[in-house]
Every structure is written in C-alpha cells, then in structure tokens.
Image (cartoon, rainbow, N blue to C red):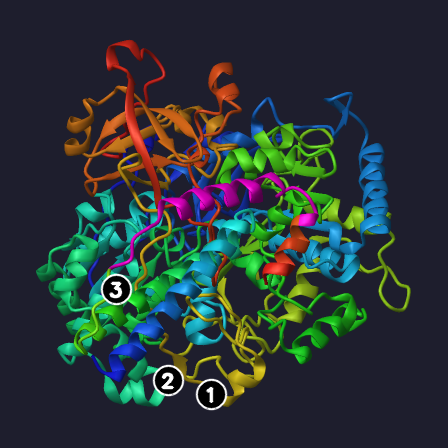
C-alpha cells in the first residue's frame, strides 16, 4: 500500500453522468488483518473533505485505517494523509503531562497545579483589566462539542467578545461569501452534484492536492463517459490545472477582474436566466452596470490572460446545463477575497443554477472541522448562525444558556483573530488561550506574532498534543488528546456530519479539549443566572444534544441528529429535523434564500470598506427571501511589486503535509516526500536570476527572509510559490535562530475588509541564489509521483 | 474656459486634499492595520476620482498637471509610520487612534 504515497489518487473507477460513484475501499494496516481486535467508526481529519473511515485497533494501539464503503463522501477511498496520518498519534514526543514556565523554562507539573495557575491568572486579569482582557483563539481541527463548550465558557461564562478560531485564516471568506449572497452561512450543494454536473468551475481551488478524495471523484467523471468541461483558475499549473479544458493562469490578486470579465460575457451573450433572476434575486441592474466595465480585452490587460480564453470559459459556463463551481484559498487568501468569492456565487445565480441536482456553488472549507466553528460560534459568530445585531437572536442564546442577555457581548462586532492579536500587542488583552493551533507558523508576519506572544504582560496558555512552536513560548502547556482518542462530531463542506468514536486512550495524562474546557468552567465557578453551574453536561454526547437543540429552527437545524443516528452507515447532511430525519441533500431547492431580516445571519457589509449595514437599512431594502447579487469593482492591491521587490509571492499547500506539520512531520512516509520547504519559480524568472533547479535560494520581502530549495515549475511569470507548512520545530539551530524557514516570515498583516481573512497570496518579494545545487547536499526534497 | 471646467478643477483639488488626509492618517495609524489599509483604499478611491475629473475637465478647456508624488511627503510618510510603530505596543496608541477617528 505504501505506493499510495506516490500514487496519490489511486486507480480510476470511471463513471458517467448520473451514475453512482463506484465503491473502492482503500486501507492500510501495519499488522495482519487477523490481529485487529476491533474497528472503530470515525472520519478523517486531515483535510476538509470529511471521508468516512474505520480505525483498526489492536491492544491499546491504532494499527491502521480503512475507508468506509457505505459513506456518501468517499465511498471507501482515502488519500495519502488519511491512510498514513494516524501514525502521528503514536509519536514518541507526544505531550503527556502539563507544563508550567518556571525560571524561563517549561517544567512538568500536575493538572491541579496547571489549572489552578490558569484560573488564578484569569481571575487576576479580570479583576484588574475586566473581562475585555480575556481572549480565546481556537482551532479548525477540534470537535463540535469542544467548540461549543468553549463558546459557552467564553461568551456565556467569561463574557468576552474576544473568541475566534484559526478558521479565520482558512474559511472565514467561505462563510462570509455565503452570508453576503444567501443571507446565511451553509454550503448549498452536495458532493453528489459532481456526479451529475456537465461543467466544473474551480476557482483558486487546487483540489488535486488539497482534497485528494474529492479530486478522485472529479477525475473519475473526467475519465468517464460524458466528461464534464473543466475550467480552472490558478496562477500555477497545478495537477488540477493540467486536467483542465481551459486553464486561466491569471496574475495573482486579480480574481475580481477576471470574474467580472466572465460575468460580463455571460450577460453580453445573453447566457443568463432573466426570469429566474427577476424572481429569485435582487441587485441585477447594479451588477450588470459594474461588470459592463470589464470587457475581455480590458480584463486581459489586468489579469494577463488571453481575452479569447475569458470568452471561451464564459461560453462553457454560460451554455452548460449543470454547473458546479468551487472556491478555495486562491480566492480566500488573496486580495479582495470576499468580493471575488461572491462573484463566483453570482455566476451560478445568473444562470439560476443552485438548489438543483448538478447545480451548486461550493465555498469550500480549509480544515476538517472549520464548519463546526461556524455553527457553534467559536469563530466570532453566534451559535446556530445567529445574527449578533439582532437582539431576538441573542436572546434565544441567553435563554438556552440561562444567562442574562447582557452577559453575551453583542454591543459591537465580535473580535476577529487579527484584531485580537493587535489588542494583545497594545496591551488591551492580557490573557490568551490558544487551543489546537500554531499561530507562530500559520499567522502572517511572524516576527510581529513572536513579539506579541513573548510579551511579559501577556499570559499565554497553549493546549496541544505536541510541543509546537507556539507551545514552546507559552506560560502553561496542556497536553491534549488527538483524533482517535476522544469522541465527537464534525461536519464537512457539504454539510455531512460524522461521528468519530474514541478508539484508544490518550497517552499519559493527556486530556481532551472538551474535558479541559469543562474543568476550567468548574474551577472558575462559572454559573448561570440562577446560580447553577454554567456547563450542565459532563459528556460530549450531552454537549452535542445541547448544541443541536440550539440549532432548532435555524438554517443549520440539526435537532434530530443524534449520536445513535450517526452510528453505523454513513454521514448525514444537515438540516436534519423531525420533518427531514434522514438529512437534506441540498439547500435552497425551493429557491427561497435565508435573506429575510428576521432570519439572516448578518445585515451584510460594504464590500470595499467592510462597513456593516444596520438593521434599518437592511429592512428598507428587504430582499425577502431572494438571493443578493452583490457587485464589486476590481481594485489594485496595496503592496505592489517594484524594482526592489519585483516578484509576487503566493503561499500554499502540498499533498502530503497538513497545516504546520505537527502531525504529518511525524509520519515518516509522508514527511519523506518533502522534509524541507521549497520555492517554485518559472523557467524565465529562474534564468534571469541565474537559478537552476535544486539551488538554495533566498526569498526576501519587506518584512523578512527565508531560504529554500528552488524547484522550477510552471506558474505565471513573476510569481513564486512557497508552501506555508514549515516552521522551526524540526530544523537546524541556525535556521531556527535566524527564522529563515517559515513562509509567513514574508507575509504582511492585512486582511479582507469583510471576512477579516488575512492575505497570504500577494506579497512583493525578491529572489537570490545563495548556494548552487552541488553545495546544497542532503535535505533536498524528493518529488512524489508527478506532484510538485 | 467655462464654469463646468472650473468646478471640476475645484472638485479635483478637494478630492486630492481628502486623499492626502487619508494618507496622513494611514501613516499615523500604521500599526492599526485595518485603519492603515482602509485609509489607503479610500485615498486611492479619491485619487482615481481626481484623475477622472482631470480627464473630463480637459474636455471643458481646463488643463491640469498630473499628480506627482512629492519627495518631502514620501519622507514624512516614512517618519510617521516609524513613529506609529514605535508606540504600537503602548496603550496611548488607542487615544491617538481616537483622535484620528
């Protein structure tokens, strides 16, 4: 099976339009099958696809995995990370005891001592600086029950507006693009739409590498009868782009211009459904007026894409009968993120292609449980897609939690992660609890994040299974259980909920984040308004039932979804209610959107400035169940290239690594494919700089510099690519000391005005050769089967 | 020269004045990144308007010279940004933000 490291997508099981995707069961066992004691139901957490998985256990160890044939998401398949990633659970360097900083060093301690210190510091910070000095920054990889417990603690117990998740960096734009167009978060489509569509439009979504199993599904259609047309928008010639009928290799940072050009052509050629638009949308005239300014020739100049290609892409999108569009980081982490993501929604809306089989737009997720931060309110929203500007919504939460409505901060927008770090920087926030994420590698402009987190006046708690870069600088480190060692639910990008059962015990004294947050609430003596304990449950299942109850009547209604229902069989798509007990395949099948003022999750933003609309303004233009076509002009980015920094850096992901590699670095099979970072340049730029494949190259921006090995590949001239996965926990002292490895040394602190997602994909840099290939020696990354 | 052209000239200098103000505030608040980038977005918007007005005004017999970045303002801009960065970790930066808002 180890060939599946290089054979990323495995054998084709081609199928035609409307047929069921054939089963193919992938598995990897490190012991003979007869030695397996039991199989435990779960789902993969190493990308956002959400593949059903069975975990093989022998004794007290995980010994392998197998894809669940019955599961609607993967039909038995697994990608390389799913097949091999579980081995990280058994790493020898797992944290097994709490650590406290004493005399400048982290020392092992007991849970009582660690928790007491956290509680004591929480109290003293709240006494001196009020609850507004308390903040919580969580993950995109915990379970729904854990996020919900954290939300209850932070919002209902502490009462702080400073709660956000790392999903701000990966999926915030998906959320806000959906809210701005449809009135509420929630991806409308179903993965089965891929089985039925005749046109696939992938915008900034390198699915072949980021969601390998979804790409298997697409590849099986592309290699089967009635191949759908494939249009890919990406400055790099990725494995996804290589399969495309039309690859629009645009200049980074110009997504809005390109999409406006495509919308221009749809309207100019009459490839729009005017009756449907008039009945089910608002804002058409304004959109038509704005995109009229973007004829293909003008767009061609901005994006450096041939005008004929833009028209050809629009023709495919305009004449296809079943169009599935998908969007990911190429849009979300780029300039004008939300404005661009909304224009993809507009493509489907202009064609009336939503809520029907084979017609969908997917604002994809980055992380496996990102969707759950959005539903539980751990990402700076309120639970159940509620609108913080709507007092009735806030009151519903206050009632469910039995707390005073004023306890739940809703006098101003919840603090987003970037703002939270700013408030840590200026001393407003004095307590920061980071759970299951690694901002010292994943945040932009790392020298700044290091300065912020190292301040004496800021108390930093980190919960993590490993001593990550961030854990190393914490005041208290709590060892946590990983996937497979705890029970809980999570939801993927087509609203499929899976239950993941505890297969083995966590090592040593490690505890689940759920237990830790509940313990914190107890020790803080957080109570409801009648004096009863704020957290009334003790098990994840009780937390799940409380969470699903709070979703009742909301768009993400999961009130009929129980652990029992999720056991056995396949994942279930919400809404799952008493009237649709088996789940719901598509949202908006009646073409009524969630834009009514009493329902909507937000009154929306100005796309240029991010200014919030007020309730009265929104009611005055009540879209009343119709989707909103919001237009945006292209604007040039704030940091342009110049003579000193002539190249544009875009950061991204690779097939075999996940996030900041805390797990995948510890899996030998995966790590060996790319143990060191690299920088991709095109031949023309490399020639001009005298760089050849394998040379060691220095990349420098206005904020920092790194060194990496050059790989020549096909990307838009003037663009360089560096994977963002690499930090310092596994590198030599020199590079750790000089901070010369992480891509985010180079990026800057700027975010999208609407989604507040940081910009990672457009940074001006220069490149310079430091050592030629012959002198680089070992550590050079190997290439895995056609993956670059 | 007619009145429309003169009006456009006046409007253009107002846009440019506003743009300058935005850029000054941006530099002063360089560590408040949302203020910094938003002010620059708005400054750019004003400058685009100004350029459009200049072009339109020429149709009304009103000739205006193109915008040019001044060396002094570039230097001052750098000084303001460094000042902003130097107090970025202090709480007084919040009061200064209040003033600029």
A68 relative position to A537: left or right: left
Q: Are marks 3 and 1 on the same chain?
A: yes
Element under disc 2: strand
Image quarter hosting the C terminus of chain A = top left
Residue at 37% across, 54% down: A335
- Tell me the residue that label 3 is attached to: A259
Quarter where residue A608 is shown: bottom left
Q: Note whether residue A771 is visible.
A: yes
Q: Note whether residue A438 is visible.
A: no
A200 relative position to A61: left or right: left
* x, y percent for residue A361: 34, 67
Front-most of residues A26 and A697:
A697
Distance from label 3 to label 2 (Cα)? 19 Å
Front-most of residues B18 and A588:
B18
Q: Is residue A268 above or below residue A298?
A: below
- Magenta stretch in the rendered image: B66-92
* x, y percent for residue A612: 53, 71
- Tell me the residue that label 2 is attached to: A282
User: Do callouts 2 and 1 mark residues in contact (Cβ within 8 Å)?
Assistant: yes
Distance from label 3 to label 1 (Cα)? 26 Å
* x, y percent for residue A271: 17, 78
Q: Is residue A33 magenta?
A: no
Badge 1: residue crowd in 10 Å (few <14, some 14–19, many ≥20): few
Image quarter hosting the N terminus of chain A = top left
Q: Earlier in the sequence, mark 3 or mark 2?
A: 3
Residue at 31% across, 67% down: B50
Residue A548 disc label? none
Q: Is residue B88 magenta?
A: yes
Q: Earlier in the sequence, mark 3 or mark 1?
A: 3
- Tell me the residue that label 1 is attached to: A621
């Amino acid at each position: 099976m180890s060939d599946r490291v290089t054979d990323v997508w495995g054998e084709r099981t081609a199928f035609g339009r409307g047929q069921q995707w054939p089963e193919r069961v992938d598995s990897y066992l490190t012991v003979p099958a007869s030695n397996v004691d039991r199989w435990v139901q779960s789902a993969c957490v190493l990308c956002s696809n959400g593949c059903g998985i069975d975990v093989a256990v022998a004794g007290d160890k995980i010994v392998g995995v197998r894809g669940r044939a019955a599961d609607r998401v993967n039909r038995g398949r697994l990608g390389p990370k799913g097949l091999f990633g579980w081995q990280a659970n058994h790493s020898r360097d797992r944290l097994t005891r709490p650590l406290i900083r004493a005399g400048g060093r982290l020392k092992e301690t007991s849970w009582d001592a660690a928790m007491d210190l956290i509680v004591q510091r929480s109290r003293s910070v709240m006494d001196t600086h009020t609850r507004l000095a308390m903040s919580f920054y969580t993950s995109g990889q915990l379970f729904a029950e854990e996020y919900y417990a954290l939300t209850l603690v932070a919002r209902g117990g502490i009462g702080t507006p400073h709660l956000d998740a790392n999903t701000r960096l990966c999926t915030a734009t998906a959320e806000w693009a959906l809210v701005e167009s449809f009135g509420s978060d929630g991806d409308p489509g179903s993965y089965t739409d891929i089985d039925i569509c005749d046109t696939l439009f992938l915008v900034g979504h390198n699915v072949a590498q980021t969601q390998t199993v979804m790409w298997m599904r697409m590849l099986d259609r592309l290699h089967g009868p009635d191949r759908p047309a494939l249009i890919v928008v990406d400055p790099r010639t990725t494995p996804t782009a290589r399969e495309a009928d039309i690859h629009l290799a645009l200049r980074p940072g110009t997504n809005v211009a390109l999409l406006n050009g495509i919308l221009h052509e749809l309207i100019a050629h009459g490839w729009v459904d005017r009756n449907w638009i008039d009945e089910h949308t608002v804002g058409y005239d304004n959109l038509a007026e704005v995109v009229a300014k973007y004829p293909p020739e003008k767009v061609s100049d901005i994006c450096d894409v041939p005008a004929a290609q833009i028209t050809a892409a629009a023709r495919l999108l305009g004449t296809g009968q079943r169009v599935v569009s998908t969007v990911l980081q190429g849009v979300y982490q780029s300039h004008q993120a939300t404005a661009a993501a909304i224009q993809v929604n507009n493509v489907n809306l202009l064609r009336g292609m939503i809520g029907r089989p084979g017609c969908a737009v997917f604002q994809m997720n980055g992380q496996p449980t990102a969707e759950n931060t959005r539903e539980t309110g751990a990402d700076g929203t309120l639970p159940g897609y509620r609108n913080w500007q709507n007092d009735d919504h806030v009151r519903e939460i206050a009632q469910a939690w039995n707390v005073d409505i004023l306890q739940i901060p809703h006098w101003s927008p919840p603090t987003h992660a970037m703002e939270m770090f700013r408030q840590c920087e200026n001393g407003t926030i004095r307590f920061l609890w980071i759970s299951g994420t690694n901002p010292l590698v994943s945040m932009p402009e790392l020298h700044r994040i290091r300065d912020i987190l190292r301040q004496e006046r800021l108390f930093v708690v980190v919960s993590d299974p490993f001593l990550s870069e961030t854990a190393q600088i914490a005041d208290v480190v709590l060892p946590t259980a990983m996937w497979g060692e705890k029970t809980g639910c999570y939801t993927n990008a087509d609203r499929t909920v899976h239950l993941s059962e505890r297969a083995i015990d966590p090592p040593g004294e490690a505890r689940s984040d759920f237990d830790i947050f509940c313990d914190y609430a107890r020790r803080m003596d957080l109570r409801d308004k009648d004096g009863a304990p704020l957290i009334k449950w003790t098990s994840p299942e009780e937390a799940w039932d409380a969470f699903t109850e709070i979703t009742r009547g909301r768009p993400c209604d999961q009130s009929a979804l129980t652990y029992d229902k999720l056991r056995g069989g396949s994942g279930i798509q919400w809404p799952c209610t008493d009237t649709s007990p088996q789940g719901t395949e598509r949202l908006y099948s009646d073409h009524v959107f969630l834009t009514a003022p009493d329902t909507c999750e937000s009154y929306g933003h100005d796309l240029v400035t991010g200014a919030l609309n007020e309730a009265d303004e929104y009611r005055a233009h009540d879209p009343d169940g119709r989707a909103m076509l919001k237009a945006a002009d292209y604007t040039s980015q704030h940091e342009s290239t110049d003579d000193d920094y002539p190249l544009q850096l875009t950061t991204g992901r690779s097939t075999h690594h996940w996030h900041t590699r805390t797990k995948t670095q510890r899996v030998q099979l995966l790590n060996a494919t790319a143990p060191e970072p690299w920088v991709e340049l095109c031949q023309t730029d490399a020639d001009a700089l005298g760089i050849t494949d394998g040379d060691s190259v220095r990349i420098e921006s206005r904020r920092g510099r790194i060194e990496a090995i050059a790989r020549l590949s096909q990307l838009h001239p003037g663009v360089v690519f560096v994977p963002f996965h690499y930090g310092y926990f596994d590198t030599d002292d020199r590079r750790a000391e000089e901070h010369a490895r992480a891509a985010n040394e180079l990026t800057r602190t700027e975010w999208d005005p609407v989604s507040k997602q940081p910009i990672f994909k457009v940074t001006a840099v220069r490149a310079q050769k430091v050592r030629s290939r012959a002198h680089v020696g070992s550590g050079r990354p190997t290439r895995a089967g056609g993956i670059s | 020269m007619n009145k429309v052209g003169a009006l456009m000239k006046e409007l253009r200098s107002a846009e440019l004045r506003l743009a300058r103000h935005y850029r000054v505030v941006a530099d002063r608040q360089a560590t408040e990144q949302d203020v910094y980038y938003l002010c620059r977005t708005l400054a750019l918007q004003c400058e685009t308007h100004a350029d459009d007005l200049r072009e339109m005004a020429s149709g009304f017999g009103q000739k205006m010279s193109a915008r040019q970045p001044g060396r002094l303002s570039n230097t001052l801009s750098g000084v303001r940004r460094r000042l902003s960065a130097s107090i970025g970790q202090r709480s007084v930066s919040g009061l200064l933000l209040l003033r600029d808002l």
